[in-house]
Image (cartoon, rainbow, N blue to C red):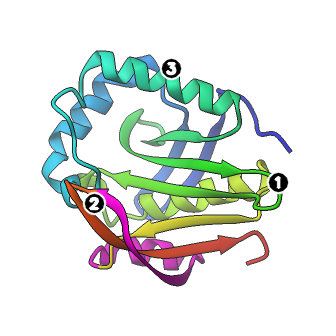
Amino acid sequence: MRAPGTHTVLTAQAAGGAIVLRHPNWADYEAWADLRARNQDYLMPWEPEWTDAHLSRNLYKARLNRLKKWVAKDTAYPFHVFRAGTDVLIGACNITHIERGSAQSAKLGYWIGEGFARQGFARAAVKSTTTFCFEKLGLHRVEAAVQPDNEASIKVLEAVGFTYEGRARGYLKINGEWRDHLIYAKLSAD
C-alpha cells in the first residue's frame, strides 16, 4: 500500500489544543529556523551535533529537496507539527527508514519546542503519525529509540502504546558522543 503524496496533512487533539501535521515546505523556513535556534540548548542533549550551517537557508532548501524524494520513493514521511488554528510551528515528527517486504516497518523521531513541552503535543503527534503508518502506509511495526535519561520521551512513547524492547549500545551519535538508546516499538496489532 502506498501513502498519499507530498501534501499529506494529519490532525490530532492534544491536552494543550489541536495540532496539524503536514510536510515541510519553503514557506516554513523562517518559523523552523527561529524555533530551532531558540531551542538549540534544549534539544542539544537529544540530537546529533549541529553544524554551523544547520539553520541556513541553503541547507534547509537541500533538506526539502531530499525530503520530497524520500516521500516520492515511500522511504520517509517528514511532518512539521503546528498548533491548529494558529499556524504556529511547535516541532516535528518524522517517519524514516521505511522497510517494505517482510519487515513492513519504520522508525519514528520527534521533537517539540520547550515552550510547548508537556502539553500533550508530542503525544498527539506520535499517536497521529503512528496511526498514519499503520492505516495509510500499511506498516506492521514502528520503532522509536530514546536515551535512557529522557524520561519525558519515554512517558510519551509508553502513553501511546509503545512497548520497551531492550537497550541498544552506542546506537546513535548524539552531540558528538555515541549513546546507548532504549528501543520501543508498537505493532499494528497492538
Q: Determine which of the numbered discs, if any, sits on residue 65 in the image.
A: 3
Cβ–Cβ under 8 Å for marks 3 and 1: no
Lower sequence index among marks 2 and 1: 2
Report the span colored magenta. 149-173
Percent position (x, y) of residue 109?
46, 55
Left or right: residue 160 versus residue 150 is: right
Q: Secondary structure at mark 3?
A: helix
Q: Is residue 151 visible?
A: yes
Expressed as whole percent of the image width and height from the top left, the position of residue 161 reads 60, 77
The residue carrying mark 1 is: 101
The mark closer to the camera, 3 or 1, is 1
**Residue 69 spot, x, y in % from top left:** 61, 25
Horizontal side of 37 relative to 180 (left or right) equals left
Secondary structure of residue under mark 2 = helix
The residue singled out by tag 2 in the image is 46
Q: Can residue 160 be seen? A: no
Q: Residues within 10 Å of mark 1 (few under 14, many from 20)?
A: few
Sequence-wise, the earlier of marks 3 and 1 is: 3
Amino acid type at circle 3 is: Asn
What separation in Å lies between label 3 and label 1 (alpha carbons)? 26 Å
